[in-house]
């Protein structure tokens, strides 16, 4: 695959987009009555059937289809059959309270197959890139290295270098989309996608962890940085519904910038933004009222959104949302209903944050006669940052129109996500 496909921003989302395209598991249900069916299997179990019959049923069901059959060679042995890339793959299947064919354990056969399809699909389309991504990563530019550097006050020189300390890695299942703190790529799969250091929180692909330096910082356990952190992780860690940086920026902007011409369009000081970002990441009490140029505060809000590992509206939700909007644009009530149904797929942190941001953009647009920032202008500026449009993005105009609709339609998100 062309390496240009893997170029991206701070976090590299393309493996996440690839995972979204992996075939979904399709259980082939057995319609016959099976005697002595093992309790651990459902109607995906077909008993003692011949391999050609299994292959025929799978190909009839389509890509991602799977079933379980009894093995003719060994008593109490079972075979998992999966159709991938139009080939039927057979695996010896085990159960010890959880289902497995290798090291990973799963609560259901369907989850096992879903994880397997993801790995096979990514290996098919990106194996060369995956082989190289850890080797080509520059450790000094890795997120973990940057966080450690920002933890230190530049005005206070270290008298003594810290003693090298190895990371305490162990396999980890990340419940939400997670990115590697070494190579910045998405950690694909459904369970045990990588490893995490129990002392400092460093998360990485297993191969990437083997190249990490002995620079574990135990005092950084339960990482408290604000920027470039997954929204759900941040909100859970701080027991908030909306990231504090976003809330603070919005409060300051609405307090003194709603009537400022060119709000969000005029650039602020990049140097000052980076300084504020470091202060937030270090947990300092940042007083945004002392920032003289309010455009810098606006820029800080946009910077926060840009550095999210996964954009506010992820790929799968964006595509479904765009389809719901485009298919019903002539019927406003139906359009709102369909879009609201798709927005329910957002996780809580993303939904609450999107709701607060949209409400803020409405307030800004209500002053457009003075600040010159209409909903159209705001949609043009924010849509590339808010929406994850994929490797073959929708036309920019489609993204702008969709965000314009969300800004100009109050209460478009489900009521449960209103603060």
Image (cartoon, helix red, strand yellow):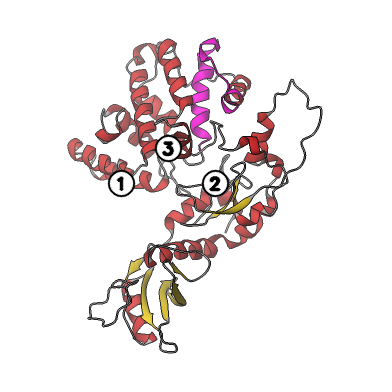
- Tell me how far mark 3 sits from mark 2, CA to CA: 15 Å
Is 297 rendered above or below residue 292?
below
Q: State which quadrant residue 330 falls in.
A: top left
Which residue is nearer to you in this view: 126 or 348?
Answer: 348
- Name of the residue lying farthest toward the front: 97
The x and y percentages for residue 300 are 52, 24
Total tally of numbered discs in the picture: 3
Residue at the disc numbered 1: 323
Disc on the earlier residue, 3 or 2: 2
Q: Which mark is residue 179?
A: 2
Which residue is nearer to you in this view: 216 or 290?
Answer: 216
Q: Using the rendered image of the protein, determine whether residue 43 is visible from the camera's viewpoint.
A: yes
Residue at the disc numbered 3: 312
The x and y percentages for residue 93 are 44, 75
Horizontal side of 124 relative to 403 (left or right) equals right
Is the Cβ of the residue at disc 3 closer than 8 Å to that at disc 2? Answer: no
- Tell me how far mark 3 sits from mark 1, CA to CA: 18 Å
Residue 363 on the magenta span: no
The x and y percentages for residue 41 are 33, 72
Of helix, strand and loop, which one carries label 2?
A: loop
> Residue at left 55%, top 12%?
291
């Amino acid at each position: 695959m062309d390496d240009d496909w893997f170029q991206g921003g701070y976090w590299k989302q393309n493996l996440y987009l690839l995972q979204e395209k992996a075939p979904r598991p399709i259980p082939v249900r057995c319609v016959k009555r099976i005697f002595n069916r093992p309790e651990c299997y459902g109607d995906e179990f077909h008993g003692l059937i011949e391999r050609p019959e299994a292959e025929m049923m799978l190909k009839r069901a389509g890509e991602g289809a799977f079933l379980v059959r009894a093995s003719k060679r060994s008593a109490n042995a079972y075979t998992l059959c999966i159709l991938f890339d139009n080939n039927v793959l057979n695996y010896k299947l085990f159960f010890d309270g959880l289902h497995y064919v290798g090291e990973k354990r799963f609560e259901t056969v369907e989850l096992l197959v879903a994880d397997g399809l993801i790995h096979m699909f990514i290996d098919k389309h990106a194996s060369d890139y995956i082989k190289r991504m850890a080797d080509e990563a520059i450790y000094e530019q890795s997120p973990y290295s940057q966080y450690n550097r920002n933890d230190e006050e530049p005005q206070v020189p270290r008298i003594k270098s810290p003693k090298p300390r190895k990371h305490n890695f162990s396999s980890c299942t990340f419940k939400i989309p997670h990115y590697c703190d070494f190579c910045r790529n998405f950690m694909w799969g459904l369970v045990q996608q990588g490893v995490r250091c129990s002392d400092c929180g460093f998360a990485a692909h297993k191969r990437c962890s083997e190249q990490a330096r002995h620079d574990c910082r135990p005092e950084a356990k339960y990482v408290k940085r604000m920027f470039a952190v997954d929204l759900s992780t941040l909100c859970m860690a701080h027991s908030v519904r909306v990231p504090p940086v976003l809330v603070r920026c919005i409060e300051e902007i609405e307090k003194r910038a709603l009537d400022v011409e060119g709000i969000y369009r005029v650039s602020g000081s990049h140097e000052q933004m980076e300084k504020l970002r470091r202060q937030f990441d270090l947990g300092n009490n940042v007083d945004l009222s002392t920032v003289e140029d309010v455009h810098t505060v606006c820029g800080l809000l946009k910077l926060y959104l840009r550095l999210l590992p996964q954009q506010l509206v992820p790929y799968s939700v964006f595509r479904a949302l765009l389809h719901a909007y485009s298919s019903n644009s002539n019927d406003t009530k139906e359009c709102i209903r369909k879009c609201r149904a798709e927005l329910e797929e957002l996780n809580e942190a993303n939904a609450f944050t999107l709701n607060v941001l949209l409400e803020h953009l409405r307030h800004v647009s209500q002053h457009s006669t003075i600040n010159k920032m209409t909903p159209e202008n705001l949609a043009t500026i924010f849509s590339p940052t808010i929406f994850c449009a994929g490797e073959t993005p929708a036309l920019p105009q489609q993204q702008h129109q969709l965000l314009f609709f969300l800004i100009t339609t109050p209460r478009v998100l489900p009521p449960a996500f209103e603060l």
